[in-house]
Image: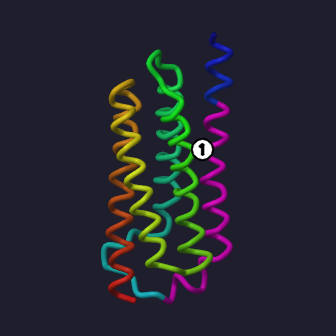
């Protein structure tokens, strides 16, 4: 059983952090000089803050889905929804940093936030630990939405 739990954690981490890696590559490869030239709101965090925040959030997401997976009342539709949400998570970075489409990125982000809310509701029914681990992620994405809207207004 312990071996299965370790293996499942590694698999969920691999999938979750793959989304992070794809988004990170899109950001690093296409961010500049475009991002430096757009007008940002005064509350825009410094660039160095994003890597540790996102690393922590992806780790929380991994634990959340892993704990849900090992819950006795889990359902596969929630697992599938988790994977779909990762696609939207990655898509935001590509739309925003690769294609520089701020409005379309906002739409992707709204869909992502709705998916996170659905996941949080489903997690709460089965595993409170998973539920609580997703709340910082939701809050960060809501802040990202505020930033995204501000960028639309300013640019």
Q: Residue at x 67, y 33 (%)?
A: 11
- 67 versus 134 height, above or below: above
Q: Is residue 19 magenta?
A: yes
For label 1, the crowd category at 10 Å Cα-Cα, with few meaning under 14, some 14 to 19 and many 20 or more, is: many
**Residue at mark 1:** 16
The stretch of residues the image draws in magenta is: 10-37
**Whole-percent x and y of residue 75?**
49, 27
Q: Residue at x 47, y 65 (%)?
A: 108
- 85 versus 131 height, above or below: below
Task: Give the quarter of the figure containing the C terminus.
Answer: bottom left
Residue 144, by quadrant, is bottom left
Task: Give the quarter of the figure containing the N terminus.
Answer: top right
Frontmost residue, 126 versus 58: 126
Q: Residue at x 67, y 64 (%)?
A: 25
- 7 versus 106 height, above or below: above
Q: Residue at x 38, y 82 (%)?
A: 152
**Whole-percent x and y of residue 120?**
36, 39
In the rendered view, does 24 fall on the left or right side of 122? right
Which structural element holds mark 1?
helix
Frontmost residue, 54 versus 101: 101
């Amino acid at each position: 059983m312990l071996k299965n739990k370790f293996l499942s954690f590694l698999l969920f981490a691999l999938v979750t952090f793959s989304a992070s890696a794809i988004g990170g590559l899109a950001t690093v490869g296409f961010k500049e000089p475009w991002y430096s030239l757009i007008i940002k709101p005064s509350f825009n965090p410094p660039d160095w803050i994003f890597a540790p925040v996102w690393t922590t959030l992806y780790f929380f997401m991994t634990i959340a889905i892993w704990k849900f997976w090992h819950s006795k009342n889990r359902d596969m539709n929630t697992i599938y929804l988790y994977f779909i949400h990762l696609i939207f998570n990655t898509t935001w970075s590509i739309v925003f940093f690769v294609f520089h489409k701020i409005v379309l990125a906002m739409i992707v982000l709204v869909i992502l936030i709705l998916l996170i809310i659905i996941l949080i509701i489903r997690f709460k029914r089965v595993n409170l630990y998973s539920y609580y681990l997703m709340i910082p992620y939701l809050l960060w994405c809501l802040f990202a939405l505020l930033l995204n809207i501000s960028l639309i207004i300013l640019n």
